[in-house]
Image (cartoon, rainbow, N blue to C red):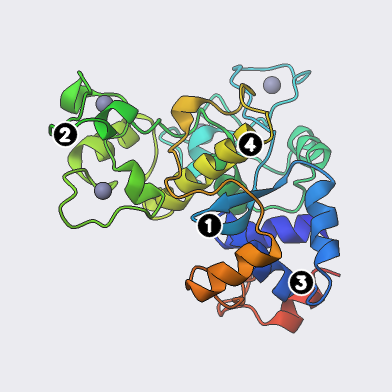
């Protein structure tokens, strides 16, 4: 069931509401979802803007060694192929594999409980899990009032000049002088330099928000310092409460309109929003 949940989460931009997951998978039995979340570290319960969300993460990383003999624990996959299924080199000239179904890669995917994920699903998962894939958001740009905040590097900065509060959906927008668009010249230049294709611009906001949510969850759990997360990776989630919702808090949040009714989730392979019975069918 966990790998099906991973596919559903990847089809929903890397995270889903905790209540939505229960509503779609096992209504009336939240303990089943809790069990799955507690059973490993691929499904992480995070508090984002007061809402509990289940964010997916993997511990699998791309092997960077050219001509690796294969004794490593990394995925043997070309970065460009992972990100967009296209590579500036053709298959023959590229030093890295374009074959997700090779024996080595299938073994690595199985070992990490990621078997059955498509290239696109794996890409969604890795964008928010592997801190080497995306450039960091510039924290200095977000601090201070000038056009570049306190960032000394201006437009030449190698980190993204994008509003952190926009990423965490906390920016009111009007009057904010920071960039709210990954395709603005500075962020686009940094992304292109890192080989991030234009096709990924749209899902970037959720990838960065999920990275930040994972960092915050690790911090709460005392796991910060883990090599896969760093302070620089994180966009601090303004408004994050950092606690599970107890019954009273849940009722209050309902009154304040912070909680919404459960939503049907997007199911992989379907064109329309998933139907609950269809989701359950697929997760048996
Ligand atoms: Zn290797
Ligand atoms: Zn390649
Ligand atoms: Zn900067
Ligand atoms: Zn803003």
Give the quarter of the image for residue 186. top left
Relative height, residue 253 to residue 190 (above, below)? below
Secondary structure beneath label 1: loop
As measured in the structure, the alpha-carbon distance from the residue carrying label 3 to the one carrying label 4 is: 27 Å
Of the numbered discs 1 and 3, the one sitting upstream in the chain is: 3
Of the numbered discs 4 and 1, the one sitting upstream in the chain is: 1
Query: Nearer the viewer's eye, disc 3 or disc 2?
Result: 2
Quadrant in which the N terminus is drawn: bottom right
Of the numbered discs 3 and 2, the one sitting upstream in the chain is: 3
Q: Which mark is residue 11?
A: none
Q: Which mark is residue 25?
A: 3
Circle 1 residues within 10 Å: few <14, some 14–19, many ≥20: many
Q: Which mark is residue 220?
A: 4
Q: Is mark 2 within 8 Å of ligand 4?
A: no
From the image, tell me which residue sits under label 2: 145
Query: Is residue 249 or residue 220 the one in the foreground?
Result: 249
In the rendered image, residue 95, in percent from the top left (x then y), is placed at 55, 24
Q: Is residue 82 visible?
A: no
Circle 4 residues within 10 Å: few <14, some 14–19, many ≥20: few
In the rendered image, residue 85, in percent from the top left (x then y), is placed at 51, 46
Secondary structure beneath label 4: helix
Q: Is residue 150 visible?
A: yes
Q: Is residue 122 left or right of residue 138?
A: right
Secondary structure beneath label 3: helix
As measured in the structure, the alpha-carbon distance from the residue carrying label 4 to the one carrying label 1 is: 15 Å
Relative height, residue 9 to residue 88 (above, below)? below
Q: Is residue 261 left or right of residue 8?
A: left
As measured in the structure, the alpha-carbon distance from the residue carrying label 1 to the one carrying label 2 is: 27 Å
**Which residue lies at the image location 16% right of the left edge and 45% below the top edge?**
177
As measured in the structure, the alpha-carbon distance from the residue carrying label 3 to the one carrying label 2 is: 46 Å
């Amino acid at each position: 069931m966990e790998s099906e949940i991973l596919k559903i989460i990847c089809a929903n931009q890397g995270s889903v509401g905790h209540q939505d997951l229960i509503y779609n998978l096992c209504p009336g039995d939240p303990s089943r979802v809790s069990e799955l979340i507690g059973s490993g570290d691929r499904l992480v319960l995070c508090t984002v803007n007061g809402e509990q969300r289940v964010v997916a993460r993997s511990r699998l990383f791309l092997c960077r060694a050219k001509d690796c003999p294969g004794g490593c624990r990394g995925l043997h996959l070309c970065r460009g192929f992972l990100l967009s299924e296209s590579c500036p080199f053709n298959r023959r000239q590229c030093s890295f594999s374009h074959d997700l179904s090779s024996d080595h890669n299938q073994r690595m995917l199985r070992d990490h409980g990621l078997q059955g994920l498509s290239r696109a699903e794996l890409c969604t998962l890795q964008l928010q899990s592997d801190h080497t894939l995306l450039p960091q958001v510039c924290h200095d740009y977000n601090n201070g009032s000038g056009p570049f905040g306190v960032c000394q590097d201006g437009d030449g900065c190698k980190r993204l000049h994008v509003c952190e509060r926009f990423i965490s959906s906390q920016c009111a927008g009007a009057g904010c002088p920071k960039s709210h668009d990954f395709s603005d010249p500075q962020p686009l230049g940094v992304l292109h330099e890192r080989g991030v294709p234009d096709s990924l611009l749209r899902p970037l906001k959720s990838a960065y928000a999920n990275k930040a949510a994972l960092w915050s969850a690790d911090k709460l759990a005392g796991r910060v310092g883990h090599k896969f997360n760093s302070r620089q990776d994180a966009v601090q989630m303004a408004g994050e409460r950092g606690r599970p919702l107890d019954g009273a808090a849940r009722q209050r949040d309902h009154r304040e309109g912070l909680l919404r009714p459960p939503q049907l989730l997007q199911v992989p392979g379907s064109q329309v929003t998933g139907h609950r019975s269809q989701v359950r069918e697929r997760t048996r």
